[in-house]
Image: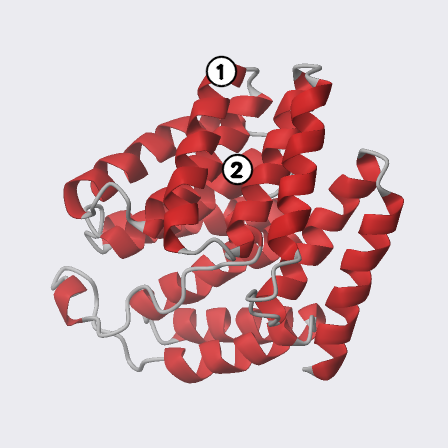
């Protein structure tokens, strides 16, 4: 199953830095160039060049540590959390998630929306690597911060509900998961009916209904998801391509091999063009 953080990482969560300054943290001897790093990283992701994306992130993680640039390290760690999840590197993914949580505490960022989004990313990684129970308390932390700072229809809540639903599904809490998915859809559809995130949630719901043996709802979800991806007003960028590659195996799983090939073909064309 999918989650938005497979393709939609929090960028520059701490850009600016002043509001997060903590005098108890040792002054860094330098700062890593976050903006330029993220721009370079986006270029690799647009081409699906995961090898160079990983090298870039690991190099700058090491540089941030050597400079004692903890804000910069947290920025890089937030990207590595998703990268290691996408590339199925379990041990590294779990370790960097734990480190990011430590840095958030050390920097006094527990009430920051940007940091809460990193916590959400870490929780998603714990769930992805088999620790759904460990993820649930982290989702509660995220919800508390979002609730205190955001409107109920803020797009960040869409990602939150989708990711929490994934963990609930793994734990067999199907009715709670379905409720979360519906909330995610309601929020995301208001943002844009062509948003590929809608397809992600619908595909996830198909897997939920498969676990419940509800075949009729599976078909409805899959064809609604394909309809979203077929919209002419969808932006056909690297983000869209990644969603296609992640949704494709689910269509194959449910017997729609032709749709799988179509989606993979679209993604390949976009990556080659980029």
Q: In which image quadrant can residue 243 be found?
A: bottom right
Q: CA distance from mark 1 to mark 2?
A: 22 Å
Point out the image quarter for the C terminus: bottom right
- The residue carrying mark 1 is 175
Q: Secondary structure at mark 2?
A: helix
Q: Is residue 88 visible?
A: no
Residue 42's spot in the image, x, y percent?
Answer: 54, 75
> Mark 1 or 2 closer to N-term?
2
- Residue 126 is marked as 2
Point out the image quarter for the N terminus: top right
Image point (67%, 29%), residue name:
207
Q: Is residue 236 above or below residue 201?
A: below
Image point (63%, 34%), residue name:
221
Tell me: 268 left or right of 274: right
Extreme-front residue of the structure: 232
Comparing labels 1 and 2, the label whose residue is closer to the camera: 1
Residue 224's spot in the image, x, y percent?
Answer: 63, 41
Image point (69%, 56%), residue name:
244
Image point (52%, 51%), residue name:
197
Pick the front one: 131 or 171: 171
Q: Secondary structure at mark 1?
A: helix
The colour style of the image is secondary structure
């Amino acid at each position: 199953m999918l989650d938005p953080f497979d393709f939609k990482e929090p960028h520059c969560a701490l850009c600016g830095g002043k509001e997060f300054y903590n005098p108890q943290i040792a002054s860094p001897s330098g700062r890593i160039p976050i903006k330029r790093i993220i721009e370079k990283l986006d270029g690799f992701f647009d081409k699906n060049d995961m090898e160079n994306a990983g090298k870039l992130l690991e190099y700058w993680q090491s540089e941030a540590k050597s400079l004692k640039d903890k804000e910069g390290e947290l920025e890089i760690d937030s990207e590595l959390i998703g990268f290691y999840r996408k590339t199925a590197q379990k041990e590294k993914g779990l370790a960097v998630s734990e480190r990011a949580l430590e840095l958030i505490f050390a920097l006094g960022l527990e009430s920051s929306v940007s940091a809460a989004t990193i916590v959400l990313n870490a929780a998603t990684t714990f769930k992805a690597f088999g620790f759904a129970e460990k993820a649930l308390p982290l989702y509660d932390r995220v919800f508390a911060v979002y609730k205190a700072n955001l409107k109920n229809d803020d797009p960040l809540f869409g990602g939150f509900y989708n990711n929490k639903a994934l963990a609930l599904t793994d734990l067999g809490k199907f009715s709670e998961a379905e409720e979360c998915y519906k909330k995610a859809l309601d929020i995301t559809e208001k943002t844009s009916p062509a948003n590929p995130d809608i397809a992600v949630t619908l595909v996830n719901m198909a897997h939920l209904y498969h676990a419940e043996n509800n075949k009729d709802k599976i078909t409805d979800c899959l064809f609604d998801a394909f309809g979203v991806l077929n919209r002419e007003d969808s932006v056909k960028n690297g983000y869209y391509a990644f969603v296609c590659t992640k949704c494709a195996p689910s269509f194959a799983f449910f017997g729609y091999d032709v749709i799988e090939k179509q989606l993979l073909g679209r993604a390949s064309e976009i990556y080659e063009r980029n």
